[in-house]
Image: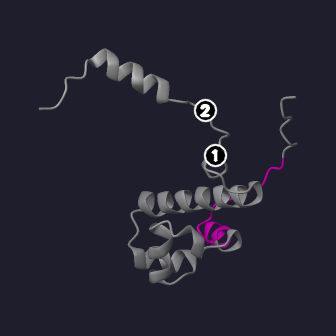
């Protein structure tokens, strides 16, 4: 027979184990990627999401979307499946431009670290 665990006991055990950290705004940095790679991955992921939204919003078939974005249908399928490692930032920017999207870049000053 299993021992009874009182809800209060379980909650206090769980609250001791929880540690909540504020996000940096970049999930890739938060999970430990080096800063340079995390920024690149974040930008690629953002472009992939926007391109997938474009295809869905326009109601395009994969064949139609591939033609519009200047890629093959299998390549588009890989992008829609978020195979981020197979796409460079350049390739995604080119696809966005072919879709008529305007991609902008903004560079900010580095965040000051707490002393």
Q: Please report the residue visible at 39 percent of the width from the left and 63 percent of the height from the top.
A: 59
Can residue 103 be seen by looking at this rendering?
Answer: no
Q: Please report the residue visible at 55 percent of the width from the left and 81 percent of the height from the top.
A: 71
Among the two numbered marks 2 and 1 on one chain, the one whose residue lies closer to the N terminus: 2
Q: Is residue 15 above or below residue 95?
A: above
Q: Please report the residue visible at 65 percent of the width from the left and 41 percent of the height from the top.
A: 25
Residue 62 in percent (x, y) is at 41, 75
Q: Is residue 1 left or right of residue 58?
A: left
Residue farthest to the top, as pictured: 8
Task: Give the position of the C terminus as an image quadrant.
Answer: top right
Q: Which residues are magenta?
A: 92-107
Quick one: SS at disc 2?
loop
Q: CA distance from mark 2 to mark 1?
A: 9 Å
Residue 12 in percent (x, y) is at 40, 19
Q: Which residue is mark 1?
A: 30
Residue 92 in percent (x, y) is at 63, 69
Residue 100 part of the magenta-drawn span? yes
Q: Is residue 71 above or below residue 3?
A: below
Q: Nearer the viewer, residue 104 or 38?
A: 38
Q: Nearer the viewer, residue 100 or 83?
A: 83
Q: Nearer the viewer, residue 48 or 1?
A: 1
Q: Is residue 101 left or right of residue 72?
A: right
Q: Is residue 76 left or right of residue 34?
A: left
User: Quick one: label 2, few (<14), some, or many (20+) residues within 10 Å?
Assistant: few
User: Quick one: label 1, few (<14), some, or many (20+) residues within 10 Å?
Assistant: some
Residue 67 in percent (x, y) is at 50, 80
Q: Which residue is mark 2?
A: 21
Q: Please report the residue visible at 25 percent of the width from the left and 18 percent of the height from the top.
A: 6
Q: Which image quadrant is residue 93 in? A: bottom right
Q: Nearer the viewer, residue 86 or 36?
A: 36
Q: Are marks 2 and 1 in contact (CB under 8 Å)?
A: yes
Q: Is residue 45 above or below residue 65?
A: above
């Amino acid at each position: 027979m299993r021992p009874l665990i009182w809800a209060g006991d379980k909650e206090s055990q769980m609250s001791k184990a929880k540690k909540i950290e504020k996000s940096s705004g970049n999930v890739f940095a938060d999970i430990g990627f080096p800063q340079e790679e995390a920024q690149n991955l974040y930008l690629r992921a953002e472009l992939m999401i926007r391109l997938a939204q474009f295809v869905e919003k326009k109601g395009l078939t994969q064949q139609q979307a591939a033609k519009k974005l200047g890629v093959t249908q299998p390549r588009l399928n890989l992008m829609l499946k978020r195979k981020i490692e197979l796409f460079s930032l350049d390739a995604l920017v080119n696809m966005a431009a072919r879709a008529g999207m305007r991609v902008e870049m903004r560079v900010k000053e580095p965040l000051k670290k707490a002393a």
